Amino acid sequence: MKSLFLLLLLSLSVYSADIDTKLYEGNNTIAHYEEVRKLIEQEKPQEQADIERIATERMILAKLANMLSFTPKIHSMPDSLLPDDQNISTENYLSYLNALTDTYATMNTLKEQASSMQLKRKSLSESIHSMTIEDKKNLRLYQLQYAFYKLKGKNQELSIQEYEAITEKGKERFKNALKRVTFNIQNLEQKLTATKKRFSSIEQEAIALKLAKERELMHHDSVSKTLNTNLLSNTSSRIEAITTKIDQTILLSLAYLQIKENQKTLDLFNASKKDIDTLTPELTEHYTFKHTILKEVFKDVAGNMVLALSSVEQSAESLYEYTYKKLTESLFVFNERGISVIDILKVLLVLIFGFMLAAFYKRKIMNLATREKLSYSSAKMISSAGYYALAFITLLVALKTIGLDLSNLGLIAGALSIGIGFGLQTVVSNLAAGIILMFERTIRIGDYIEVTDTIRGTVSDMKMRSTTVTTNDNIDVIIPNSSFIQNNVINWTLENDTRRIHIPFSVAYGTPNEKVEEVILGELKHTNINFVSKPLKYTPIVWMTAMGSSSVDYELVVWVKGPSTLKPSGTKSDFLKFIYAALNKHHIQIPFPQLDLHVKQTEENKEDNQSKIM
């Protein structure tokens, strides 16, 4: 009772609300904003926190109105750097690649922001659905924040689509312009060699400066200002030399790609990737994007096969990156969470593992019954209950892996109850009856039951929804479990399988009762029919039941058990044959219905008869 009271208090303390979709969907959004604005103005703040909350609500509401008329502002690509009818310089070609990389980086940033917006919306959605009465005053603020992130996410999607279109168009233009670029391979090789020498001297200078720093720290607690300046200058020169080296390497690899020197192209391309890893995080990201764009260009120009055969390690890495990208790419959004292929695979693995575990549990429990450690009926009940429990837990875990908020299962159950009330009432009634039967154990597998006058047989299987009864004619009758709860059922073998049967027979009038009893009971001792012959409780007896119009009616009352109980019609037939043979053996007449006809004569008939005689 105490737990029930606490549960009631907990349920009353929850103020579950739905997301106000009219703040970001539909044709009456502006009108709805006006209604919300009036509600904000009507609220009287009680404390400083209320004043700040109301001010925030006004600010967000004003931003929402502006976000409805959003138009993506996209910077166009400098297509003039790559004219269609002129030769292109290496400087312009590299500048276009840098612009394309910046566009790609902007698009990637927007995608990261969209993912962040999705997480914020998910958090706000959970807060709205699980809001308590004490926090009810913040509901409107949460609704406005959710609408803000929802509209911002939509606007970001529009921008991402525009940037994707521009990026694809830019990559195609960059690839097609390769044949018109005037590369001077000898000059590029000389510049790259000079840059490598300069970089080597900068590295040696860096080593010398580090040694000088260590010497100063041995004698002083700090490093001199001059040495710090030299260290910073060296770092700046080093980064500038690396970026120059990477750009020159890229240009030289493109030059070799133009003349179909694929192996040299790929060697230089892979060498530039090693230099990228030594840059600062910001520059590493920039050149990684550039590297990704060039890889796609190389695949289109040189072909996938050439790229794959160039290096097993690089090919494996590329395959891993491509596979990981496709597996983690969002296919659709569910509950403010992007669902990818890997998420679907997780759900399938959870379901497969869960149902395999449930099946293993069911099989192990049933094995206990075969080893006689547990009755078959009890094993069936325990295995079925455990199987469905594990299946339900598996379903919950699978839903959790795709981001379903399990705290809202109460709302889901409420929605399902409506459908159950209208369309699934019979199914749920049968399921509930199945659970009751499993725990009451008034009907078990192997019991011989009688449901109606025409349905009688052995319980061969019990499931949550229905029970299978196999008749003596080997006909399987599937009966809904609710029938056993709502109607009378005769269980012939509930406590034991010993039952008393009545075998009717008749003899002619004039036959002594003592002789009938002596013949039947005497012959019964020598019969091969299976019956219970224990004295006192199970003693066979012959009853006189009626004195009919043409016979004296008796009943042989005898107890049977085991297979004889489960086949009442066959057992009755055996005893009738026995009685017939016993009566014939002792010359006791078995009567049959007789009718005596008496003709009554009238006076007229008598006179006619006499006249005929005379």
Image (tube, rainbow, N blue to C red):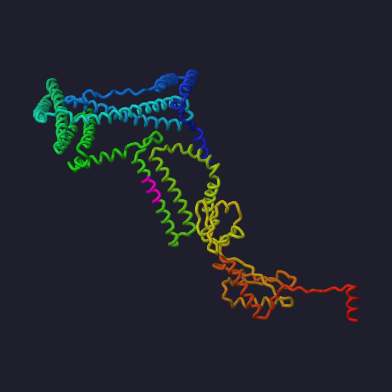
Q: Quick check: 172 above or below 487?
A: above
x and y percent of residue 490 in the render? 60, 59
Q: Can residue 218 be seen in the rendering of this structure?
A: no
Q: Please give the name of the residue rendered at 23% of the width and 39% of the height, measured from the top-left corner.
A: 318
Q: Is 66 within the magenta?
A: no
Answer left or right for 480 relative to 92. right
x and y percent of residue 102 in the render? 25, 26
Choose top left, top right, bottom left or bottom right for residue 196.
Answer: top left
The one nearer the camera, 415 or 310, is: 310
Q: Can residue 447 be seen in the rendering of this structure?
A: yes
Answer left or right for 341 relative to 174. right
Q: Main secondary structure of the magenta part?
A: helix
Q: Quick check: 14 above or below 33?
A: below
Q: Quadrant of the C terminus?
A: bottom right
The one nearer the camera, 287 or 217, is: 287
Q: Please give the name of the residue rendered at 72% of the width and 76% of the height, measured from the top-left corner.
A: 508
The one nearer the camera, 463 or 183, is: 183
User: Which contiguous range is marked in magenta?
Assistant: 348-357
Residue at the farthest front position: 85
Q: Please give the name of the residue rendered at 21% of the width and 25% of the height, measured from the top-left corner.
A: 83
Q: Quick check: 369 above or below 163?
A: below
x and y percent of residue 106 in the render? 28, 27
